């Protein structure tokens, strides 16, 4: 039989177990520190790359502005050597001696520079900067070139076309920049020891290097190595990406020179360079993580030393620092077991070991938690009583399904909803389905099973046949899956009888259907009455123009079509594109098959209050275009576009902007001398009903109508719009 461990041995074991979490925590801290240092190195590499790209971008932009000013100067635009040289030579003192400016004629001859170069001495016709500027008719950045000794490290050229009155290039201005000058601009970013910065030009050649390696294995002008090009963004950049100031910026860890592991910070495309300049900064990965390795060794030594000190303290202080505190803890445990949660043992352990002090404080917190649990249990019982009262007052029944056991716990009202005067002894799924009417069972099974899997909350309305009287009732079920901390699943839900609400909805649908039917009959009666009324009386000798009758009937039909769309959609709203299509449908393609009208805009569903006024307004515009405007000729065209702008301030509605534009029709002489019904309808009635503005522009190329209205709650009718127009 094993001899029980003595107090010191037990204490050693206890100290070891107590220190284990601390050791694990320190180990986790070391791992976290390494991760943080790695992240910091990544951030540093990316920050340096972005800073280098931004500095180079500011220089490029400044140089571009200087070339723009230079290209617009009359002496330069004259293409004459004397006048241009007289202007440029004094400018040399304002720039660095590493920046040379010049101008080139369209035949390639350099006719003036800030260095006073004679005319017809240098021909730049084959130089990359000149050809690119003339071909693209825009600012360009060339590649690295060998330069005279005055420009340190070679040169890079920038070009900008000199545009004539027709916008076409009549020459070019350029700038030759010493690469050493560009390097001086980038040195202030502060590369750490062992780091290097590389700039690659449009031909994937090394343009610039900042490195503390002696000698640098990557020479200027040589092709960039494949391992570096794999990290850089491509040139030319994909369409649209050169406008994104952060395109291509990233951090990668890969092998660099001599296979050494490096951290590469890849900068975004240099702003303003059209993607022709790309920046990369690399750091020595081993050097970046060296402080972490040293900190890890120090941490290991601290852990070992701390454990040795703890075991020594346990050995020499067992009697003084263990027995007395344990006695106090045991006494406290006995009193807590008796329900005396107001006792605190931590004050009696002042001067004891920190571990026991922490244990005492933890036990005190446990006592507080136990006291809180007792109070919470009492409060929970009270809350359940209040919940029962609330369910009873709301006519709802609660149920709870334990997925593990299949037990269903119900409130007393649950079984009463199914027609049982007294609660059943048990309740199960099959019994529930027997009450569901056959037509609804498959849907109920599908929705309940999906909810019980936790795929979605339960929301369902279905019919049941009650026990006893056999009455058909509508029930609404709401519920959701709840996971306990131990992972056990319970499904909580409520049931309520919504039969009266469903019957009210049915009565409302019948009323809306009857109203729609009567409105259609009324519109048909109005059309018939109008047709009879607009006929000239027999024997009067007079006549009402057929055009007036047709216009009236067309407006009435436009009103009816808008109403039909609302009726079909249940008065929930109408697609704006459908309203436009209805108005323009009678005016199809021209004889050659080309479309005569086009609608441009996002899918937008306008509320019912907008449908009828907009339908009538679009009909008036289409009718006017067919009689007097763009649709009177085969080449005419109508474009309808719309957009929805978000609210400028919180609490305000979004704004709908709709634009009707006619082109290709007869020349519009100007605004009409008299405002007709259609014009008044648009400018007065429609603007008032929409709560916005309607503007008509009678431009020579065609009529333009712009409608701007907030999508807020309004009450209006087509009759109100017409009445406002007449006023």
Image (spheres, grey):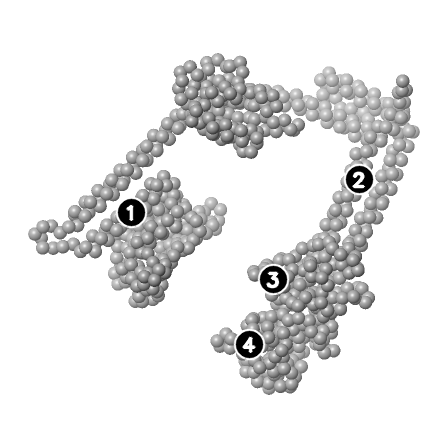
Secondary structure of the residue carrying numbered label 3: loop
Q: Identify the mark nearer the N-term, 1 or 2.
A: 2
The residue where tag 1 is placed is: 559
- In the picture as drawn, the residue positioned furthest to the front comes out as 592
Report whether 596 appears left or right of 38. left
| 349 is higher (above) or lower (below) than 512 | above
Q: CA distance from mark 4 to mark 2?
A: 67 Å
Secondary structure of the residue carrying numbered label 2: helix
Secondary structure of the residue carrying numbered label 1: helix
- In the picture as drawn, the residue positioned furthest to the left comes out as 539
| 442 is higher (above) or lower (below) than 64 | above
Report whether 176 appears left or right of 663. right
Q: Is disc 4 in contact with disc 3, using a CB cutoff of under 8 Å?
A: no
The residue where tag 4 is placed is: 162
Instruction: Classify mark 2: residues with Cα within 10 Å, few (<14), some (14-19) or many (20+).
Output: some
- Between label 2 and label 3, give the one nearer the viewer: 3
């Amino acid at each position: 039989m094993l001899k029980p461990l003595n107090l010191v041995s037990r204490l050693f074991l206890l100290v070891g177990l107590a220190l284990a979490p601390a050791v694990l925590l320190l180990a986790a801290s070391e791992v976290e520190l390494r991760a943080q240092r790695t992240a910091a190195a990544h951030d540093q590499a990316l920050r340096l790359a972005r800073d280098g790209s931004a500095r180079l971008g500011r220089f490029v932009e400044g140089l571009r502005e200087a070339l723009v000013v230079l290209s617009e100067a009359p002496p330069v635009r004259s293409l004459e050597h004397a006048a241009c040289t007289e202007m440029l030579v004094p400018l040399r003192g304002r720039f660095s001696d590493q920046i040379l400016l010049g101008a080139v004629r369209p035949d390639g001859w350099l006719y003036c520079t800030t260095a006073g170069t004679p005319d017809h001495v240098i021909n730049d016709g084959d130089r990359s900067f000149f050809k690119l500027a003339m071909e693209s008719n825009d600012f360009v950045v060339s590649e690295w070139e060998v330069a005279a000794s005055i420009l340190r490290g070679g040169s890079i050229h920038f070009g900008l076309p000199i545009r004539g009155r027709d916008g076409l290039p009549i020459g070019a201005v350029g700038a030759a920049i010493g690469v050493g000058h560009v390097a001086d601009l980038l040195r202030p970013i502060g590369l750490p020891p062992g780091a290097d910065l590389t700039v690659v030009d449009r031909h994937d050649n090394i343009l610039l290097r900042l490195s503390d390696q002696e000698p640098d294995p990557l020479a200027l002008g040589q092709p960039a190595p494949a391992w570096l090009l794999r990290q850089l963004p491509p040139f030319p950049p994909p369409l649209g990406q050169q406008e994104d100031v952060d395109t291509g910026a990233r951090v990668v860890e890969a092998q660099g020179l001599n296979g050494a592991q490096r951290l590469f910070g890849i900068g975004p495309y240099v702003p303003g360079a059209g993607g022709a300049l790309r920046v990369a900064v690399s750091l020595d990965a081993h050097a970046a993580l060296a402080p972490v390795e040293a900190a890890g060794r120090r941490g290991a030594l601290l852990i070992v030393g701390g454990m040795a000190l703890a075991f020594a303290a346990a050995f020499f202080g067992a009697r003084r620092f263990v027995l007395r505190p344990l006695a106090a803890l045991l006494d406290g445990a006995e009193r807590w077991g008796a329900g005396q949660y107001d006792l605190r043992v931590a004050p009696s352990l002042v001067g004891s070991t920190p571990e026991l002090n922490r244990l005492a404080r933890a036990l005190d917190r446990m006592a507080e938690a136990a006291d809180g649990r007792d109070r919470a249990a009492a409060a929970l019982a009270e809350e359940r009583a209040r919940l029962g009262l609330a369910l009873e007052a709301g006519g709802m029944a609660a149920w709870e399904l334990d997925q593990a056991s299949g037990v269903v716990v119900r409130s007393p009202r649950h079984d009463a909803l199914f027609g049982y005067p007294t609660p059943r002894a048990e309740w199960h799924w099959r019994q529930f389905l027997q009450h569901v009417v056959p037509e609804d069972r498959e849907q109920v099974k599908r929705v309940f099973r999906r909810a019980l899997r936790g795929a979605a909350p339960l929301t369902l309305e279905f019919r049941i046949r009650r026990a006893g009287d056999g009455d058909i009732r509508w029930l609404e079920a709401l519920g959701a899956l709840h996971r306990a901390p131990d992972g056990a699943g319970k499904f909580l839900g409520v049931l309520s009888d919504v039969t009266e609400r469903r019957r009210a909805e049915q009565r409302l649908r019948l009323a809306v259907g009857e109203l729609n039917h009567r409105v259609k009959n009324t519109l048909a009666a109005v059309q018939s009455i109008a047709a009879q009324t607009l006929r000239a009386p027999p024997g009067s000798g007079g006549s009402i123009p057929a055009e007036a009758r047709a216009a009236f009937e067309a407006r009435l039909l436009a009103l009816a079509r808008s109403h039909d769309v609302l009726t079909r959609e249940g008065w929930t709203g109408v697609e704006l594109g459908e309203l436009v299509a209805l108005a323009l449908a009678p005016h199809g393609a021209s004889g050659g098959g080309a479309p005569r009208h086009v609608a441009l805009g996002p899918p937008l569903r306008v509320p019912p209050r907008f449908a009828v006024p907009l339908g009538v307004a679009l009909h008036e515009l289409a009718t006017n275009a067919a009689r007097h405007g763009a649709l009177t000729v085969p080449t005419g065209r109508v474009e309808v576009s719309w957009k929805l702008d978000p609210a400028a301030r919180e609490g305000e509605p979004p704004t709908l902007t709709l634009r009707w534009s006619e082109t290709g029709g007869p020349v519009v002489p100007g605004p009409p001398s008299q405002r007709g019904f259609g014009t008044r309808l648009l400018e007065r009635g429609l603007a008032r009903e929409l709560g916005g503005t309607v503007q008509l522009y009678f431009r020579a190329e065609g009529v333009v109508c712009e409608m701007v209205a907030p999508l807020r709650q309004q009450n209006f009718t087509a009759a109100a719009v017409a009445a406002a127009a007449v006023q």
